Image (cartoon, rainbow, N blue to C red):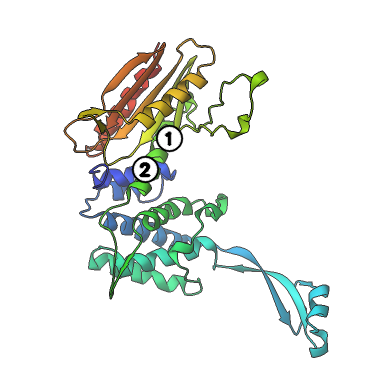
Amino acid sequence: MTASPIAIRNVYVMMAYAFRAMRNEGSDRIAAESFDHLHDLLAEILIRGVGAQVKRGLHHDYRRNREELATVRGRIDITGTVAARSMVRGRLVCEFDEYEVDTLHNRVLKSVIVLLIRSGQISATRKAELRRLLPYFDDVTLIAPTAIRWAALTYHRANAAYRMLMGTCELIVRGLLPTQSPGSTAMTTWVSDEAMSTLYERFLREYYTVHHPELSPGAPHVPWDYDRESAIGALQLPAMRTDVTLRRGDRTLIIDAKYYSRTLQVRWDKETVHSGNLYQMLAYVKNADTDRDGSVSGLLLYARTDASTQPDLDVMVQCNRIGARTLDLDTPWDDVRAELEAILGWLET
């Protein structure tokens, strides 16, 4: 069971925010289209994004090479030449840079395109369009999707257009990895909760960054407000990193994004907010409110499920407002945005 039956069009909007691509070429056209399956949406993002990148030219980068050559190229590695006894054979070990298309970003694109073609539940038309892109990657190495190190992907002015594409690829690989069975490879029909949880968190933070920069949206750590003079082993205290923190004047709102199959827990035949989530939020709020004046509030924001009962908590705990509510991602985008805007009422005095 997935956490929320999200409208597929909203998945794209979430991705566009999460990967900072709100103004990408073709984004309006994709948002206006109707998709019957998530794989088709992901494939379409790659088709249009990679197609546009091909027209601009795939990103090239310099890569350091070290080879034994008959002529000098770049810098001679004296130590390497002597160690390999290369001069005896009339050759030199040289180190040089080559400007090539076989970059990590392009390797990721090629590998994920192949993954979608082989395993994705996408239309025959989109499979054909993806295949037409592959010849542009003939000089790019195919790598195993499981071997991709997402943290190694960096962005700068020359490859900034790859951010949304890499975000799409990451979502595909993390949520739609092939499952091996005798004689076949199949992809799951929806994105895993773990992958969607990460996307949901990024989306919330970037939404407020785009539309409300005056609230200084971020995901800062909350320091423990402990007595430094008598502390023992304080380094063993776990870090408290918020998902989204908003500030207006002297008011602070800490939002914790939650994407679960069950938004409520059942204890002794009673449905309640998840204990761990609530205790975590209390720890964040109480340690952030160092003046003890109730200026810090905390909200657990769950992705709404189809359960009959949903979180609906709004209480004052020792002067601090603590709550839990849901965001319905299976409604038109305008309704989702209205809910996000309504949350800002928590920053009012």
What residue is pinned by disc 2? 197
Residue flagged by tag 2: what amino acid is it?
Answer: Ser
Looking at the rendered image, the disc whose residue lies closer to the viewer, 1 or 2, is 2
| Residue 131, image x, y percentages | 34, 71
Please tell me which residue is depicted at 83% across the width and 79% down the height of the picture: 82
Badge number at residue 96: none
303 versus 154 height, above or below: above
Quadrant into which the C terminus falls: top left
Q: Position of residue 283 (x, y in %)?
A: 46, 24
Q: Residue furthest front?
A: 268
Q: Which of the labelled discs sits on residue 205, or is there none?
A: 1
Judge whether residue 324 can be spotted in this image.
yes
Q: Residues within 10 Å of mark 1 (few under 14, many from 20)?
A: many
The answer to whether residue 169 is left or right of residue 65 is left
Q: Is residue 129 visible?
A: no
Q: Which corner quadrant of the image does residue 183 belong to? A: bottom left
Left/right of residue 303 with respect to residue 203 in the rendered view: left
Q: Position of residue 345 (x, y in %)?
A: 35, 18
Tag 1: residue type?
Answer: Arg
